Image: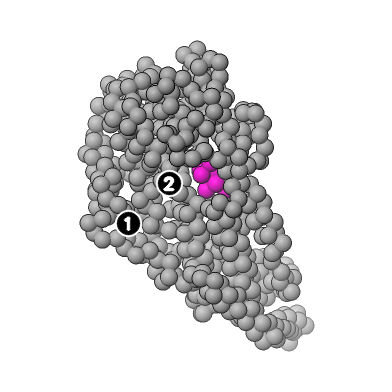
Amino acid sequence: MKLRWKILIGVGIFIILMAASLSVTMHVQPEGELEAYKKSLRDKGEKLELSEVIPPPPAPEDNARNAVEDAFRILGSNNQDVPNGMRMVAPGKAMVGWSQPDARNSDFTNSWDDFGAKFAANGPAIELLHQVLERPKLDFQLDYSKGARMLLPQLAPMKRTAQMLDAAAICELHNGDSGAATTNILTLLALVRKDTGDTILISHLVRIAMTAIAIGPTWELLQATNGNDAQLAAVQDAWQRLNFLSDAENSFVMERAWVSVEIEKSRASHEGFKDTVGLMGNSFGGSSGGSSWSDVLEDFAQGPRSAVGEGMWRSSWSYSEELRLLQSDQIVLDGVRMMQTNETRSYKTNFDVMSSRLTSLGFTNTAGALVHALRIPDLRDEFGGWNFLGNALGRTLRMEAARDVVVTAIALKRFQMKHGTWPETLGELTPEFLTSATIDPYDGKPLKYHPNTDGTFLLYCVGEDGLDDGGDLTPVRAYGTTTWDWQRARDWVWPQPATPAEVQYYYEHPPK
């Protein structure tokens, strides 16, 4: 036998023996630590099993699903044209879309009559969607048992529906019908709030995106001259009833249960391991396709190395991985729950503490070099690591802050409609227009406000840095057109209506 083949066979045997030895010595302790940690969580009342966190189905008569899905079928798969609404044309200034001479956006320009005629085809779908206001639940009866393989066909139609209701509200405002516009805004917000029985994290993020869409028509309604207090009070109540932190908590609990199911499946069999790795988008194994000595050695060693890597993952390291993920998930859940109490009102403080705890948790593996050598796929982020959950939580907190600003802006408009002037302080809004003072969630202090001498007002949240920059609109990210540039500036300032000259300048010098 040639020396080359003797070396290759020897390398393969060495890897297999080394893996077998490590598997025996490293299996017992990680599994014991994992089970002990799970027991401690259960003792505290945490729900870890998928069967424990699947929401109960509503009674058929309480569920608006059939009407909503019928509306989806009418709307089809095409994205909705939405005319400019709350379009930012300058820092702190937005265009009143319904008052413009035509209906336009970046990719179309129509007369209002032509746009209205085209949009009239959506009338039957809108009428069906209004049924969500009459029923307490919206449940699409998802098959949670499929875990990460579950189909979610409702998500894209839900977002398209939000865009359609946005456009409908702006059209109705242009036609002077603030009542119909109010109903469409309430329907959009009801779709968000009543769908929260769906505790899938991606669904939570879609609901956040839909709520961001709802900011535009709400702002447009506040610029109408024929609205009344009852309409604004209804919209304000709909915004106040949204609870993104509670929604996020339920979604994180479901995500944790799914993770355990997937990891258990990956360690139970070779087929389960391949299925999980494929689901997470990782490649495992493969050939270099070369012909040099090093390439031959690589190709020969790949088979045993893949087998060793899979064996070590299934028998040992998967337990350490699951333990670390459960620990990080619990830190996030503890933080989210703390934010929902009155013990502290600053999201930034809680978020920073949470990040510090997660950093100190880290992830240690005594055989880290071997893991890398065996090319064991790193599934931590795919299984719901901090980068994944942290991004979702960041979006949640931003929408919570935006909701508080929107609610306060509506209360200010209601005060102004009754008294003919803006209040001197936000304290004047309670208890008639606000049950309690609105707190800036990023610094735990009241939202920042004062009336301006030109008949407008300044209202803002300090933003994620927790620093009050006096309503500084200096962008910390590249400025671009959006419904509200609150996430781009140092302080998140509620926009004031742009003047005709500012709108004209925007059209003559559009942003690039």
Image position, residue 348 (x, y; %): 63, 47
Image position, residue 257 (x, y; %): 49, 68
> Can residue 398 be found in the magenta stretch?
yes
Q: Quick one: label 2 or label 1, which is nearer the N terminus? A: 1
Image position, residue 105 (x, y; %): 42, 26
| Front residue of this view, candidates 37 and 278 | 37
Q: Residue at x 47, y 63 (%)?
A: 254
Q: Which residue is mark 1?
A: 140
Q: Secondary structure at mark 1?
A: loop
Amino acid type at circle 2 is Leu
Q: CA distance from mark 2 to mark 1?
A: 19 Å
Q: Secondary structure at mark 2?
A: loop
Image position, residue 503 (x, y; %): 48, 17
Highlighted range, magenta: 394-402
> Can residue 184 be found in the magenta stretch?
no
Give residue 268's mark: none
Q: Is residue 356 left or right of residue 479?
A: right
User: Is 178 above or below relative to 25?
Assistant: above
User: Is 285 above or below relative to 99?
Assistant: below
Foreground mark, 2 or 1, reads 2
Does residue 377 appear anywhere in the picture? no
Q: Residue at x 40, y 37 (%)?
A: 236
| Front residue of this view, candidates 188 and 412 | 412
Q: Residue at x 36, y 35 (%)?
A: 233
Dominant SS in magenta: helix
Query: Which quarter of the image is occupied by the C terminus?
Result: top right
Q: Residue at x 70, y 64 (%)?
A: 362
Q: Which residue is mark 2?
A: 242
Q: Badge 2 local density, few (<14 within 10 Å), some, or many (20+)?
A: some
